[in-house]
Image (cartoon, rainbow, N blue to C red):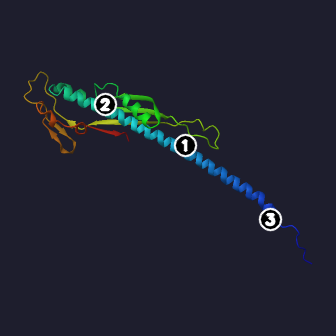
Amino acid sequence: MIHRRVHGDSGQAFPIYITVVAGLLFLAFAYLAVGQAAVNRSGAQTAADAAALAAAQEARKQLVGLWVHDLTDPTEWGDIFAGKGVVDPCWRAEQLAVENDAHLNSCNPDLLRYTVEVQTDKPVGDSVVPGTEDIKSTETATAVIDALCTFDPPAEGATLKALPHLSCKDGKEWDPDPDDRADLPKPADLFDVHLAD
């Protein structure tokens, strides 16, 4: 004799279904929170990179200005190509941080190397992960200036008949002429600016 069940098992599956769906929704929101944090961190890194490059480019601009100013005194060139004489390029780092919705926490100039730390102005935002709504991302970046040219400095006390010859990367050569400043090397010919590896 076969007995049939009056009530099936279909009602017991519903709570399991609800639990699974709730778990999946929580995971989805958790992944969204991770995504929000990643986007915030990426924005902070972009701001840090831009700020470091801006400081280094401002320093390069100053170095080229110093070189042009001291063009007829090649005894000063060595210091200039070593990065000496730059006056606070960090104001440009602050500008670029602000343009990228962040602010500058620190800027550490070290001759031809500029390291900055920035923090985003906007927090990660509301999410299912408690305590993340007020968290802001902080990132650092370093930009480096490479001198691209070499020259033979004049001997101390020597009488100059001509300015030293500049041998630069990519086979570029210059014999600077103080009477033809329009034909002097451009900033990008003298110094390369890039993010540190």
- Disc with the residue nearer the chain's start (2 vs 3): 3
Q: Farthest residue toward the left?
A: 161
Q: Residues within 10 Å of mark 3 (few under 14, many from 20)?
A: few
On the image, the x and y values in percent for residue 182 come to 15, 35
Q: Amino acid at mark 3?
A: Ser
Give residue 79's quadrant in the image: top left
What distance separates the C-alpha of mark 2 from that of mark 3? 74 Å
Q: CA distance from mark 2 to mark 1?
A: 33 Å
Which residue is denoted by mark 2 in the rendering? 59
Hey, what amino acid is under mark 2?
A: Ala
Q: Quadrant of the N terminus?
A: bottom right
The crowding category of the residue bearing disc 2, from other C-alpha atoms within 10 Å (few below 14, some 14 to 19, many at least 20), is: many
Q: Tell me the residue at 64%/51% (across/down).
A: 27
Label 3 secondary element:
helix
Q: Determine which residue is flagged by label 1.
A: 37
Question: Quadrant location of the C terminus?
Answer: top left
Instruction: Estimate how packed mark 1 is, as few (under 14), some (14 to 19) or many (20 or more) residues with alpha carbons within 10 Å.
Output: many
User: Mark 1 touching mark 3, by CB under 8 A?
Assistant: no
Q: Is residue 149 left or right of residue 125?
A: left
Residue 144 shown left or right of residue 177 in the figure:
right
Circle 2 — which element?
helix
Q: Which residue is mark 3?
A: 10
Distance between the Cα atoms at labels 1 and 3?
41 Å
Tag 2 near tag 1, CB within 8 Å: no
- Tell me where residue 93 sits by quadrant: top left
In the rendering, which numbered label is found on residue 4?
none
Earlier along the polypeptide chain: callout 2 or callout 1?
1
Q: Earlier in the sequence, mark 1 or mark 3?
A: 3
Question: Can you say whether 105 is above or below 173 in the image?
Answer: above
Residues marked 2 and 3 touching at CB (< 8 Å) = no
Give the x, y percent position of residue 177: 11, 33
